[in-house]
Amino acid sequence: MKDYQYLTITEVSNKMGVTRQALYTAIKRNRLKSSKHESRKRYIHRNDLEDFLKNRYSRNFSTYNGKLLFDPSKGNYSIKQAAGKLNIPIQKVYYMIRSKKLKYVKHGGAYVITQKNLDEYKPKKGAL
């Protein structure tokens, strides 16, 4: 197919940096529209790809009971964001939570670390 409005699964996966299987999963879950033209190959229209990218899931926009979980402007951070604020690896944050050196609040399956929790954690030199 030579229509430049349509992209193959391989072209989309290369552009997005994801596996073809991830795209097939998105198609199966009706998150990404695709169609078959003249052959067995699936094609994705550029407009459908743009819609998918706009509405794509991001952990940064997770909600719990209708409220945004991770909102740095209100001092609520994900583990990844907290690691960035503390300037340490993500695995160290998980370790500090398990060893009760860093407090957190759990909403559903998500760990929320507040600015107060970060302020209470005062790393000593060489403690990490």
Image (tube, grey):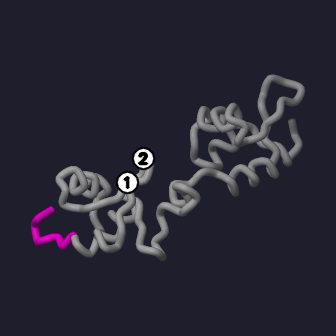
Is 22 left, or right, of 123 in this rendering?
right
* Residue 2 coordinates in the image, percent (x, y): 87, 40
Q: Please report contact status of discs 2 and 1: CB closer than 8 Å, yes or no.
A: yes
Q: Is residue 28 magenta?
A: no
Residue, disc 2: 109
Q: Quadrant for the N terminus, please.
A: top right
Residue at 10% over, 67% down: 126
Q: At x 85% / y 47%, what residue is drawn?
A: 4
Q: Which residue lies furthest to the front in this view?
A: 65
In the rendered image of this protein, does residue 120 appear above or below residue 100?
below
Considering depth in this image, is 23 or 71 the residue closer to the camera?
Answer: 71
Which is nearer the eye, 110 or 67? 67
- Give the residue drawn at x 83%, y 29%: 36
Return the mark for residue 22: none
Badge 1 crowding class, 10 Å Cα cut-off, few under 14, some 14 to 19, many 20 or more, is few
Q: Is residue 22 left or right of residue 122?
A: right
Q: In this view, does 53 lie to the left or right of 72?
A: right
Q: Which mark is residue 106?
A: 1
- Seen in the picture, residue 128 relative to 27 is either above or below; the reply is below
Q: Quadrant of residue 6?
A: top right
Question: Quick one: SS at disc 1?
Answer: strand
Quadrant into which the C terminus falls: bottom left
